[in-house]
Amino acid sequence: DTIRLSNKEYHRLMNELAQEYKTIDRTHPVFLGHGALFPEQIPILKGNLSNFDGISLNIYPNWDAGRDRAARERVLIVDELDRKLGEQLRIAKELGIPVVISEFGESSYQIGEAKQAQFMTNFTQAVSRYMAGNNDIRYAAYPKIVMGLVAHEYIPEFWKDGEIDPGESGLALFKDYQAKPAFRELSGGYKFINGQLRNIRIEGVKVLAPKEPVVLPAPKEETLKEESTSRPQSPDTN
């Protein structure tokens, strides 16, 4: 029962499991799944990552103040998300391995689909500053350790509304089998990030930059437009 293990025992077990996975399949990288990182965790993690190719982080900086409407009504701008991501990624840099952001997202519940979409735009712009392959001189001092990111989630899982939070199903990028605005914004962000990752290679746990710099213009950050009040709006429950 892993719940009864100390942090050190738990991470030792995870490292042993990663070794077992690699005895079966050495063709796929193995990442350690993790939530938010804290500096005091680094010594334990460093001693138990020998069989991992990287670490994956579930990061929700937009929920630092909570998940109710008041806490999420204002969408964090790019620089705010940059600062919050930077706190995590500068800690992760101490581990010396690549990072995948394995969960991020925002719910349209209570705040509407337009703000969910704006969050996707702002988040992908912020994380792009930490992506391997970013050669923008403005971010030269940033740790370029992020190799990928995965939005949570595509299809709503309504059971989570009762088990976790009422806004869980609103995280979905599709509603009634139709793409929400957030999906389109995310697609644009992914396209930009994929351009940065061109020619990036991983050998072992070392991230190798491309021989030729890849510099792409960042998409323009737009301020969120207020929805028109000239016609009645149906309440957004997802």
Image (cartoon, rainbow, N blue to C red):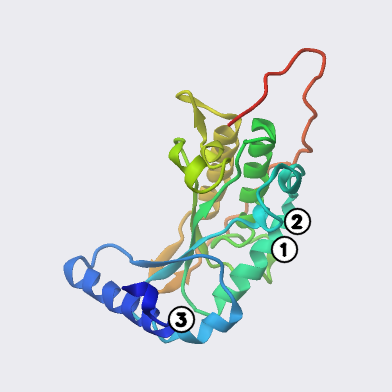
* Residue 70 found in image quarter: top right
Residue 204 appears in the figure: no
Element under disc 1: helix
Q: In the image, which is nearer the foreground, mark 3 or mark 2?
A: 3
User: In the shown orientation, is residue 115 left or right of residue 14?
Assistant: right
Q: Type of residue at label 3?
A: Leu
The residue to which callout 3 is attached is 45
Q: Is residue 1 above or below residue 101?
A: below
Q: Type of residue at label 2?
A: Asp
Q: In the image, which is nearer the foreground, mark 1 or mark 3?
A: 3
Q: Which mark is residue 83?
A: 1
State how far apart marks 3 and 2 are (Cα): 29 Å
Q: Return the residue nearer the eye: 135 or 111.
A: 111
Element under disc 3: helix
Q: Return the residue nearer the eye: 134 or 101.
A: 101
State how far apart marks 2 and 1 are (Cα): 6 Å
State how far apart marks 1 and 3 are (Cα): 23 Å
Earlier along the polypeptide chain: callout 3 or callout 2?
3
Q: Which mark is residue 79?
A: 2
Task: Look at the numbered discs 2 and 1 and tell me whether their residues touch, using CB distance below 8 Å.
Answer: yes
Q: Which mark is residue 115?
A: none
Residue 71 in percent (x, y) is at: 74, 49
Determine the residue positioned at 59% across, 35% down.
182
Q: Type of residue at label 1?
A: Arg
Residue 136 in percent (x, y) is at: 67, 60
Q: Return the residue nearer the eye: 143 or 116.
A: 116
Q: From the image, which quarter does the N terminus lie in?
A: bottom left
Task: Look at the numbered discs 1 and 3 and tell me whether their residues touch, using CB distance below 8 Å.
Answer: no
